[in-house]
Amino acid sequence: MNKILTVLMLSGALLLSFCMFSQNTSPYWSLAGNSNASISSRLGTTTSVPLRLVTNNAERLRIDINGKVGIGGTTPNGKLTVFGSGGTPAASWVSSGVPIFAGFGENMGGNADHILAMASNVPTARAVFLGRKARGTLAAPAAVQTNDYLLSLFASGYDGGTFQSPAAVDLFCDGTPSAGNVPARISFSTGSNASNRRERLKIGSTGDINLNNGQLFVRQSDGHVSIGTSTPDPNFSVTIKGGDYGTFGTGGFYGFYALAVSTGVYGEGQTGIFGNGTDYGVYGENFPSNANAYAGFFAGDVFTVGMYQSSDAKLKQHVAEVSAAVDIISQLHPKTYEFRQDGSFKLMHLPGGMHYGLIAQDLEKVLPNLVKDSKFDTKMAKPSVPGHPSSIRSSDEVIGFKAVNYTELIPILVKAVQELEARNKQQDSVIDRLEKLLTKSVPGQTVSSEAAGSLGQNIPNPGASVTTIPYRLPSGSHQARLALTDIAGRLIQSIPLSASGAARLSTSSLPSGVYHYSLIIDNRVIDTKQMLITR
């Protein structure tokens, strides 16, 4: 009986084992292939047990009970998870939700963690990574809309407690799609985490480049560049919000250098343009081909602490003495006038009030080289919208006018003074001879000395450190002096005189201003003149 029971038990165990490890329904899967498979055939499990594929007696692929596929690991995190090496990843490695694809690696050398390879003789064939986005559903997609995300690439780093995502490359829909067109832009964002990550650079669908929301903007259509605004007006425009300077430049050679056909530099603000350089703070250059061009044009008053003009002998040729300066000056006709402020003339910012000067047309008849044909283009006028140089208050108009080089009148005036001084000396000599003749011709009588005294204008005037005052004393005078007073009449200096000549007066210790000097002979003021001291 025991033997029978043993046989029955062994038979039952074999039957149970056969049932557990064999296909329990027909048709059966065969290692040699399955020609009898149908559209409803299945390979897998019908219980809460994952499907495992094994080679060389080791598990290579697993489909868990939720349908997640894992390659190289037993705990897939996404729809498809590939384990390169290492242990089971912590939960922090997986973002919220279920990613479609997840890959993990640990202690792996090299940088080729994801490779798309392509070999082809076709020039357009290449490895492609494609991200597609639509609204609606996969079965019934709808068009995307402006600013919809199309694709994102994130960079994430572990801070010791969790992962932070401080950088991203995003692709957006950059306008309204139409048949055959979906405008797109690329956005580059950086920061230290997702909350402070900001867009730093974007390239729009039209090719416009915007850095830090208008800090630097390049417009593709015309190549115009702007700083501080995303709406450039000229080829290069700078808009500064706040601060004292519209443009501030420093450099070893040029603080700021600009070259343009129309406006090289346009500045507007408390300090429109400020330049500071070891050679030139601001350098302007006109086109030599245009005789009527200027290196700088200032619509309004100009203030300068100091000014120099090139005058070195090596820069000049055909040098000749100026002659007949007094005759030239006598042909000039100084005028008083007011500048026009009507119509387009107001755009020139001509100074108001009464002024003294010459009429260019009159001067041109005498000294044509000191008159230059000029023009003012109303396009250069101050814009009606601050910060937008192309927004002009009037239609384009070119105002032609003549300009005068007053600086070159100075040498002619100097020469005229020298000629007058020579004439004065000649006249003084004649007067002395006449006085002697009169004295000899009328015995016992003398010519009035008071009528013979004279006082000349100081040279130079204005002066800075030293000036010379010519004077003449009559014969028979007993006491003579020069008295220097300030504008309030206070005596500054008294200089004794003993004979006719010229007094050399040092003014370096005197402050700038207007002074008067008088010739006093025998306690009688003969003449008083004005002297100007500048620094």
Image (cartoon, rainbow, N blue to C red):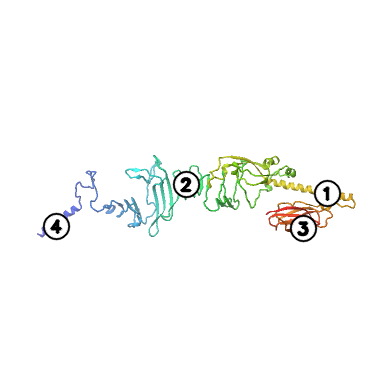
Q: Which mark is residue 495?
A: 3
Q: Secondary structure at mark 3?
A: strand
Q: Secondary structure at mark 1?
A: helix
Q: Secondary structure at mark 2?
A: strand
Q: Kindly report the distance in space between the C-alpha atoms of the residues bearing marks 2 and 3.
A: 76 Å
Query: From where the camera sits, is residue 233 visible?
Result: yes
Q: Earlier in the sequence, mark 2 or mark 3?
A: 2
Give the residue type that dot 3 points to.
Answer: Ile
Give the residue type that dot 4 points to.
Answer: Met
Q: Earlier in the sequence, mark 3 or mark 1?
A: 1
Q: Which mark is residue 431?
A: 1
Q: Kindly report the distance in space between the C-alpha atoms of the residues bearing marks 2 and 1.
A: 85 Å
Label 2 Cα neighbours within 10 Å, binned few <14 / some 14-19 / many ≥20 = many
Task: Between label 2 and label 1, give the one nearer the viewer.
Answer: 1
- Asked if disc 3 and disc 1 are in contact, CB closer than 8 Å, the reply is no
Q: Secondary structure at mark 4?
A: helix
Q: Kindly report the distance in space between the C-alpha atoms of the residues bearing marks 3 and 4.
A: 150 Å
Task: Between label 2 and label 3, give the one nearer the viewer.
Answer: 3
Q: Is residue 12 above or below residue 396?
A: below
Task: Between label 4 and label 2, give the one nearer the viewer.
Answer: 2
Q: Which residue is mark 2?
A: 209
